[in-house]
Image (cartoon, grey):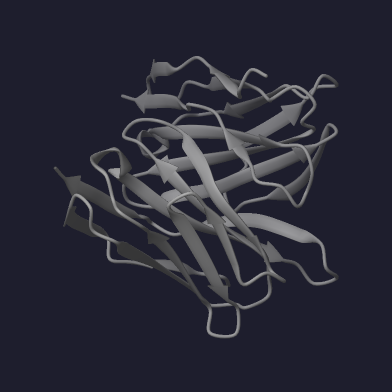
């Protein structure tokens, strides 16, 4: 059974700092991995999607890496800003036997607070 | 394009009642998924519909059901509500299997 873990559960940093959020998963048979952002009481916003054949994806100040063999992904945020304060969720889409897609399995998230 | 919309946004029900939530995906998206989010369990997958067919189902009791219409709009129904069903219910749509999902704002359900 696929399990997704995110460490730390909460993180507080001063503005301008570079930071790394961690995600680990137990089964390397994945279709893709995604990072989302969730603001309080709101839905999720997709940040980056990494296909299983890729090693990393970049968008602006964000860079996500994927190492399937070790079951790890990291989300790197450069030059953090107060507007980056949110909960960041990692999700793995399972790869079913036969190659079909399974459902998205989420970690519990890292709550990030960037202090001005 | 308009984003994923969910109605209603907030709902208060009592135990034993039933509830129907609605989701309108982004135009052109044929896949709709539903999730339940609670502080204790986090985000959990309920089910996914594609072209009116249920494609995947999560580990929830039969009280949770859904359907998708020919215009890709989807509804989720929960019968015989329990206190533990209080949660934020999120709907998401996508156009192609290898693409990301776009989430709606959610329906917050409170069961008293």
Judge left or right: residue B4 versus residue B49. left
Quadrant assignment for the C terminus of chain B: top left
Q: Residue sitting at 82 percent across and 19 percent down?
A: B71
Quadrant assignment for the N terminus of chain B: top right
Q: How many marks?
A: 0
* Position of B9 relative to A10 (above/below): above
Estimate the x, y position of residue B95 in percent, counting from the top left: 77, 37
Q: Residue sitting at 48 percent across and 27 percent down?
A: B106
Q: Is residue B61 visible?
A: no
Q: Residue sitting at 60 percent across and 27 percent down?
A: B77
Quarter of the image where one finds residue A28: bottom right
Residue B67 or residue B42, whichever sits in front = B42
Estimate the x, y position of residue A100 in percent, counting from the top left: 81, 62
Residue A66 or residue B6, whichever sits in front = A66
Q: Is residue A63 visible?
A: yes
Residue B73 or residue B47, whichever sits in front = B73
Residue extending furthest toward the bottom: A69
Q: Residue sitting at 32 percent across and 43 percent down?
A: A84
Estimate the x, y position of residue A72 in percent, counting from the top left: 49, 76
Residue extending furthest toward the top: B8
Judge left or right: residue A11 versus residue A36. left
Judge left or right: residue B28 versus residue B90. right
Estimate the x, y position of residue B7 in percent, counting from the top left: 54, 15
* Position of B105 relative to B84 (above/below): above
């Amino acid at each position: 059974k696929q399990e997704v873990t995110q460490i730390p559960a909460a993180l507080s940093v001063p503005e301008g700092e570079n930071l790394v959020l961690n995600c680990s998963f137990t089964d390397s048979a994945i279709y893709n991995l995604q990072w989302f952002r969730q603001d309080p009481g709101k839905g999720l916003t997709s940040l980056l999607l990494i296909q299983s054949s890729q090693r990393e994806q970049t968008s602006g100040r964000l860079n996500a890496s994927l190492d399937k063999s070790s079951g790890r992904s990291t989300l790197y945020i450069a030059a953090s800003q107060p507007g980056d304060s949110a909960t960041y969720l990692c999700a793995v889409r399972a790869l079913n036997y036969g190659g079909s897609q399974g459902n998205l399995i989420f970690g519990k998230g890292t709550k990030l607070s960037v202090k001005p | 394009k308009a984003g994923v919309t969910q109605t209603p946004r907030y709902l208060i029900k009592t135990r034993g009642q039933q509830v129907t939530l609605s989701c309108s995906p982004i135009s052109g998206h044929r896949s709709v998924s539903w999730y339940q989010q609670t502080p204790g369990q986090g985000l959990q997958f309920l089910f996914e519909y594609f072209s009116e067919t249920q494609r995947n189902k999560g580990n929830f009791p039969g009280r949770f059901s859904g359907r998708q219409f020919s215009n890709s709009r989807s509804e989720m129904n929960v019968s015989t509500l329990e206190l533990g069903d209080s949660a934020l219910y999120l709907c998401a749509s996508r156009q192609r299997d290898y693409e990301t999902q776009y989430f709606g704002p959610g329906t917050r359900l409170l069961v008293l």
